[in-house]
Image (cartoon, rainbow, N blue to C red):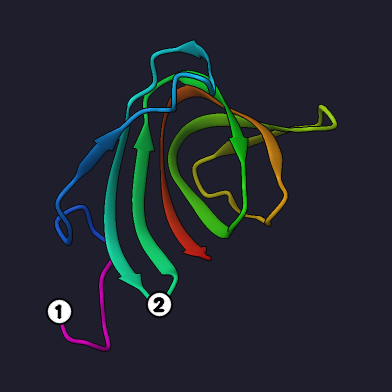
Amino acid sequence: MTDTFCRLSQDAAAPETDAPAPDRLISGSPEFTTWNVEERDGLYCGIWRSTPGKWRIQYDEWEYCRILDGHSVLTDSDGQEHHVKAGDGFILRPGFSGTWEVLETTTKEYVIRL
């Protein structure tokens, strides 16, 4: 890897594991694995995976996602469901709130701008 090129790969960073905060968890026991490949000047980029479960989300940041595999449902605060599957790309803007439900273990590439 050079300073001007970085391939998104699970081999490019050490995995970190996490889970939703207990006060956000709605159902299941989802486990997150994150390979944060880039972290610089308020920009984060990498790969994230979650096992099935459902939790509340609140976005203060801007995030672009591309789903690599799995099936999730994002439901906004108005109750509108957004099903995302392999190949889907989308943006979550600051102020998005609702729930994220992983129906099938989901892996995504992400770019977050604070």
Residue placed at 19% from the left, 45% from the top? 15
Q: Quadrant of residue 37?
A: bottom left
Badge 1: residue crowd in 10 Å (few <14, some 14–19, many ≥20): few
Is residue 2 found inside the magenta-colored segment of the image?
yes
Return the x and y of residue 18 as percentages of the image width and height. 30, 33
Residue placed at 40% from the left, 77% from the top? 41
- Mark number for residue 41? 2
Of 89 and 35, nearer the camera is: 35
Which residue is identified by label 1? 1
What amino acid is found at the position of numbered circle 1 in the picture?
Met
Q: Tell whether 72 sits left or right of 69.
A: right
Return the x and y of residue 52 as percentages of the image width and height. 43, 19
Whether residues under marks 2 and 1 lie with C-beta atoms below 8 angstroms apart, the answer is no
Q: Tell whether 69 sits left or right of 102.
A: left
What amino acid is found at the position of numbered circle 2 in the picture?
Asp
Disc 2 from disc 1: Cα separation: 19 Å
Of 38 and 104, nearer the camera is: 38
- Mark number for residue 90? none
Q: Which residues are magenta?
A: 1-8
Residue placed at 72% from the left, 50% from the top? 95
Return the x and y of residue 64 as percentages of the image width and height. 55, 59
Closer to us: mark 2 or mark 1?
2
Q: Quadrant of residue 56?
A: top right
Residue placed at 21% from the left, 52% from the top? 10
- Element type where label 1 sits in the image: loop
Q: Tell whether 78 sits left or right of 63.
A: right
Residue reaching furthest to the right: 78
Is residue 4 found inside the magenta-colored segment of the image?
yes
Q: Report the magenta stretch's main SS.
A: loop
Disc with the residue nearer the chain's start (2 vs 1)? 1
- Element type where label 2 sits in the image: loop
